[in-house]
Image (cartoon, helix red, strand yellow):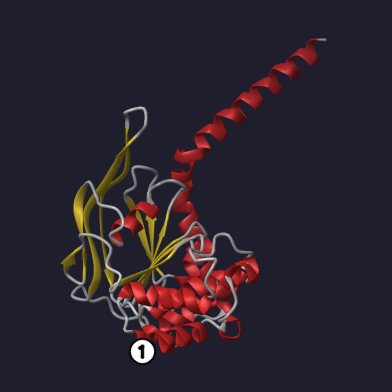
Amino acid sequence: MRLVPVPDVTQHAISVGSVSHAYARPDSGVVQTLNSVSLDIRKGELLCLIGPSGCGKSTLLNIIGGLVSPTAGEVRVNGQPMRGPAPKEIAYVFQENTLFPWNTILENIKVALEFQGVPVSDRQDRANQAIEAVGLSEFAHSYPHQLSGGMKQRASLARALSLQTDILLMDEPFAALDEQTRTYLGEELSVLLAATNKTIVLVTHSLTEAVFLADRVVVMTARPAEIKATINVNTGHPREPSFTTSAEFSDLRNELYALLRDEIEKTVGGFVGRAAARDRERRAVAGEGGARS
């Protein structure tokens, strides 16, 4: 069991300082996605970003990873400003697997190592170790189309692990999987965190996933996103499946939903609420007509 570390502000792996982001619309308008977001992420912690759909979670993750430039503010990784992708420091796991279909799983990982500049002599061993870590040794020479969705995501995770970066960014990596596989991979990720002490930033829509995996959950508002609240989960990794049936888990999940509900309302609930009100009004009018007749 990994003990939850005492927070140490000198041990920030990632510092997000007053980051804002906006992009131009085709109709010449501007969409503001992030509004002055500031956040420090400690080395070795798993932090979840959660918020209503379209609020800017993935945009913030992409800015942290150097894939998108902020319109204001700055991100620092290990004290250095981010000016673009940093493959030797940061690895990514996306929602959709990005495996090359013409390569085997082993070949996919070796290609990633080549892009990172790993010497040819080291690629085979590192690829095999990563594949073994996610339980896919039997399928190292299989092609992506021969694997299930869960196995493809494990292969994507193996590729990220093979890069041996201290930071791992994950954008809803389990969203397309069935509930059982998603739960199992979440347990594996908790074990991984305990074993490697990596800094992981995970974007998710799942309250259950956030509470089960995170050391901290950052709740974001509707667009333009700001940080509404930060929830600490004071249970060490690896977490047992029984944690999901505990009172602590239930209380944290309920707290998260209470924080998110108003933000979801701003995003989609207004439309639903107006439609429901119109429906009630129509039924009331129909009822009055029936009573008069």
Q: Quadrant of the C terminus?
A: top right
Q: Is residue 48 above or below residue 261?
A: below
Q: Residue at x 48, y 77 (%)?
A: 107
Q: Residue furthest top?
A: 293
Q: Residue furthest right?
A: 293
To which quarter of the image does residue 229 belong? Answer: bottom left
Indicate the position of residue 200 as horizontal and vertical percent values: 37, 71
Indicate the position of residue 83 as horizontal and vertical percent values: 20, 59
Residue that numbered label 1 is attached to: 121
Relative placement, left or right, of 184 versus 261 is right
Q: Residue at x 58, y 69 (%)?
A: 144
Q: Quadrant of the N terminus?
A: bottom left
Q: How many marks?
A: 1
Q: Is residue 2 visible?
A: no
Q: Residue at x 28, y 74 (%)?
A: 88
To which quarter of the image does residue 247 belong? Answer: bottom right
Element type at mark 1: helix
Along the line of sight, the residue nearer the viewer: 33 or 263: 33
Dot 1: within a 10 Å radius of its alpha carbon, few (fewer than 14), some, or many (20 or more) residues? few
Indicate the position of residue 58 as horizontal and vertical percent values: 39, 54
Please name the amino acid that badge 1 sits on: Ser
